[in-house]
Amino acid sequence: MRAAFGVACIAWAGIAWTGVAMADPAAEAGDPERGYRLSTPCASCHDGDGRTRYGLYPRIAGQHYAYLLSALREFRTKERHQAFAFQMWDPVRDLSDQDLRDLAAYYARLPW
Ligand code: HEC
């Protein structure tokens, strides 16, 4: 009985999680054209095409959308704070959630 209850809980949690994850894909989408217009300040370190030539800065062109978005969010909250991360704090400080999605969508579409 207890085992059945446990299985039911896991199944329910799975369904609930899928529901949350798939609730509204459009809410998570970014607009790459708007991202391009927002990307001017980023070019000073990441180059205009995101394929950063200066080796201390990471290349961001062609990176996965989800990874770019989570990285940008972590810089904005300063969760990412190791060695060089502070250089990212100012560029994203005043950007909205939609701005971050648009920038992530823009860089994710560029060739690696
Ligand atoms: C002053 C230089 C500078 C500017 C301007 C800048 N960045 Fe960065 N960026 C860095 C550095 C340095 C890192 C690496 C930080 C670290 O080690 O965590 C980084 C990391 C990143 C990462 C994470 C890459 C990875 O592989 O984890 C993303 C995404 C990113 N920047 C996007 C942007 C965007 C978008 C902008 C414009 C809004 C921008 N950056 C502006 C210097 C800069």
Image (tube, rainbow, N blue to C red):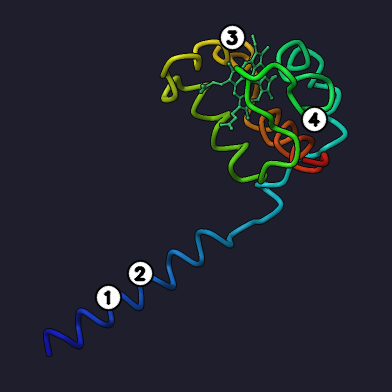
The residue carrying mark 1 is 9
Point out the tag, 2 or 4, that comes first from the N-terminus: 2
Specify whether tag 4 is near ligand 1 (CB below 8 Å): no
Name which residue lies at 73% across and 31% down: 103
The residue carrying mark 3 is 90
**Residue type at the position of mark 2:** Ala
**Residue type at the position of mark 3:** Asp
Asked if the residue at tag 4 contacts the one at tag 2, i.e. Cβ–Cβ closer than 8 Å, the answer is no
Q: Residues within 10 Å of mark 3 (few under 14, many from 20)?
A: few
- Viewed as shown, does residue 109 lie left or right of 13? right
Q: Secondary structure at mark 1?
A: helix
Q: Secondary structure at mark 4?
A: helix
The residue carrying mark 2 is 13
- Viewed as shown, does residue 82 lie left or right of 106? left
Marks 1 and 3, Cα distance to the nearest angstrom?
Answer: 44 Å
Q: Quadrant of residue 31?
A: top right
Marks 2 and 4, Cα distance to the nearest angstrom?
Answer: 35 Å
Specify whether tag 3 is near ligand 1 (CB below 8 Å): yes
Point out the tag, 1 or 3, that comes first from the N-terminus: 1
Asked if the residue at tag 2 contacts the one at tag 1, i.e. Cβ–Cβ closer than 8 Å, the answer is yes
Specify whether tag 1 is near ligand 1 (CB below 8 Å): no
